[in-house]
Image (cartoon, grey):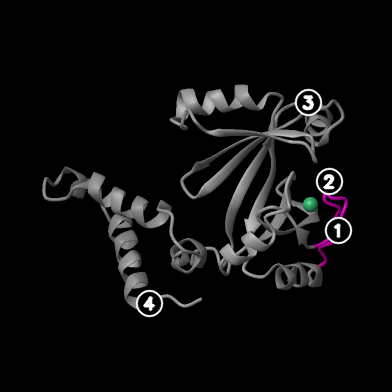
């Protein structure tokens, strides 16, 4: 995972340039804060290959990890989606899937680089229904972090005391196949949020595992 120094320096320069702007700069007709902001936004939020995401990961020493998706437990996926469509500009044709294996209805869309999943249990007593009833409210259920190598990531976490949690859909502990990659869950939460790790499939692996459906 290498990255050309010039690109990185270029991005750093843009960030530093933006951070160093003062109020006077914004009043100066020669500076265009919108343009500066846009260049940062483009640099950070445009879809790009993993090896170009250094600007995001270096700041937090995440070693190539990024947020694959955030999953919210909701009572009604279509109603929750409508709020995002009405107030936040999410596309009207955002997908809503019913997954028979896990008995979930999920609205899926992207906000920048991050995939949102609004997850509704189709049955009373399902994973998300139980979660909402236990807490008394809807909310952020888990964050899935993409990792370059799930076996190494799990080894590292376990060396620090992490333990593996059973996947609610597959009844498996540790790394196992899901539709988009190998995933594993940890018993430990971060700030009250469940942790899922995923090694996202390469296009070839995606083809190999395309029969894995219905999570
Ligand atoms: Zn699973």
For disc 1, the marked residue is: 173
Task: Work out which residue is located at the far left of the displayed protein and give it.
Answer: 30
Q: Secondary structure at mark 1?
A: loop
Q: Residue at x 46, y 67 (%)?
A: 54
Query: In which quadrant of the rendered image does the C terminus lie?
Result: top right
Please name which of the two marks, 2 or 4, marks the residue nearer to the observer: 2
Please name which of the two marks, 3 or 2, marks the residue nearer to the observer: 2
In this view of the protein, which residue sits in the foreground, 128 or 169?
169
Reading the chain from its start, which is encountered first: label 2 or label 4?
Answer: 4
Tell me the crowding category of disc 2: few under 14, some 14 to 19, or many 20 or more residues within 10 angstroms, Cα based: few
Q: Is residue 169 above or below residue 95?
A: below
For disc 3, the marked residue is: 136
Q: CA distance from mark 1 to mark 3?
A: 28 Å
Reading the chain from its start, which is encountered first: label 1 or label 4?
Answer: 4
Q: CA distance from mark 1 to mark 4?
A: 38 Å
In this view of the protein, which residue sits in the foreground, 213 or 43?
213
Tell me the crowding category of disc 4: few under 14, some 14 to 19, or many 20 or more residues within 10 angstroms, Cα based: few
Q: Secondary structure at mark 2?
A: loop
Please name which of the two marks, 4 or 3, marks the residue nearer to the observer: 4
Reading the chain from its start, which is encountered first: label 1 or label 2?
Answer: 2
The stretch of residues the image draws in magenta is: 161-174
For disc 2, the marked residue is: 168
| Residue 192 rendering spot, x and y as whole percentages | 74, 45
| Residue 21 rendering spot, x and y as whole percentages | 26, 53
For disc 4, the marked residue is: 4
């Amino acid at each position: 995972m290498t990255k050309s120094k010039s690109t990185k320096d270029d991005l750093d320069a843009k960030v530093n340039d933006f951070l160093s702007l003062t109020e006077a700069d914004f009043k100066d007709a020669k500076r265009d804060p919108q343009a500066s902001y846009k260049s940062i936004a483009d640099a950070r939020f445009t879809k790009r290959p993993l090896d170009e995401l250094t600007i995001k990961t270096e700041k937090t020493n995440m070693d190539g990890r990024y947020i694959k998706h955030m999953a919210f437990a909701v009572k009604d996926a279509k109603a929750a989606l409508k709020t995002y469509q009405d107030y936040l500009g999410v596309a009207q044709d955002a997908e809503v899937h019913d997954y028979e294996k896990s008995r979930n209805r999920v609205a899926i869309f992207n906000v920048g680089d991050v995939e949102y999943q609004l997850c509704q249990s189709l049955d009373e007593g399902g994973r998300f229904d139980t979660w909402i009833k236990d807490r008394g409210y809807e909310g952020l259920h888990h964050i899935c972090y993409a990792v370059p190598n799930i076996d190494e990531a799990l080894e590292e976490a376990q060396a620090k005391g992490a333990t593996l949690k059973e996947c609610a859909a597959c009844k498996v502990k540790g790394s196992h196949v899901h539709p988009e990659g190998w995933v594993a869950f940890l018993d430990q939460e971060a700030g009250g949020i469940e942790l899922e790790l995923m090694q996202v499939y390469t296009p070839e692996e995606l083809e190999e595992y395309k029969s894995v459906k219905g999570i």
